[in-house]
Amino acid sequence: MAIRNYKIDAYSEGKCKSNISVRNFHFIIDEPNEFNGSGQGPNPVEYMLGAFAGCINITGNHLADEMNFELRAMNVQIDAGLDRAHLSQPGKGMRPGIKEVDVKIQIDTDADEDTVNTWLDQLRHRCPVCDNLANPTAVNMRVKRT
């Protein structure tokens, strides 16, 4: 199977606000007013967690089809905490990211308990965003002056 490449373009409109373009979609990432943003969109962490919920939905429905059971409805709730102290105390040995993500999935299905447990196990292993959150991913960054 070929690797699918994703390309995102982001343009800064200030210290916290970014306009993002991907394919033919455009959206804003911003911080709330209390964190010096303009409150015009979800912040980066909220988008990441929203992407995780969306990926759970897509992967979960794909797996249900693959496993031949009906998944009539799914509700995903994600809770995660971020310690913002790293912004004012860099280098203190704190990770700047989320330490733990708690996911609760409520489903309406005709599947038995064993099938649901297999489905959840497969979901953990086959959801791409879950994989990126749970495992180290190489990130290469470069800067170019204009």
Image (tube, rainbow, N blue to C red):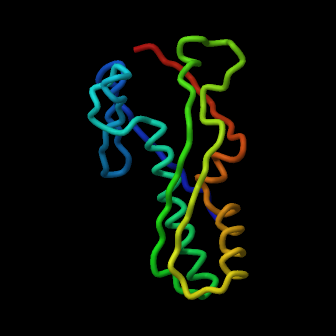
Q: Residue at x 62, y 53 (%)?
A: 130
Q: Which corner quadrant of the image does residue 142 belong to?
A: top right
- Image-based side of 51 in relation to 29, left or right: right
Q: Residue at x 68, y 37 (%)?
A: 138
- Image-based side of 117 in relation to 82, left or right: right
Which is nearer the eye, 79 or 96?
79
Which is nearer the eye, 87 or 34?
34
Q: Residue at x 60, y 88 (%)?
A: 68
Q: Where is the N terminus found, in terms of image quarters? A: bottom right
Is residue 64 shown above or below 78? below
Is residue 71 shown above or below 44? below
Q: Where is the C terminus found, in terms of image quarters? A: top left
Q: Pinpoint residue 145: horizontal percent, then vertical percent.
A: 45, 13
Q: Pinpoint residue 45: horizontal percent, then vertical percent.
A: 48, 38
- Image-based side of 26 in relation to 97, left or right: left
Q: Pinpoint residue 100: horizontal percent, then vertical percent.
A: 65, 42
Q: Residue at x 57, y 60 (%)?
A: 104
Is residue 85 shown above or below 43? above
Q: Which corner quadrant of the image does residue 95 belong to?
A: top right
Which is nearer the eye, 100 or 11?
100
Counting labels gives 0
Is residue 127 shown above or below 70? above
Q: Pinpoint residue 87: horizontal percent, then vertical percent.
A: 53, 16
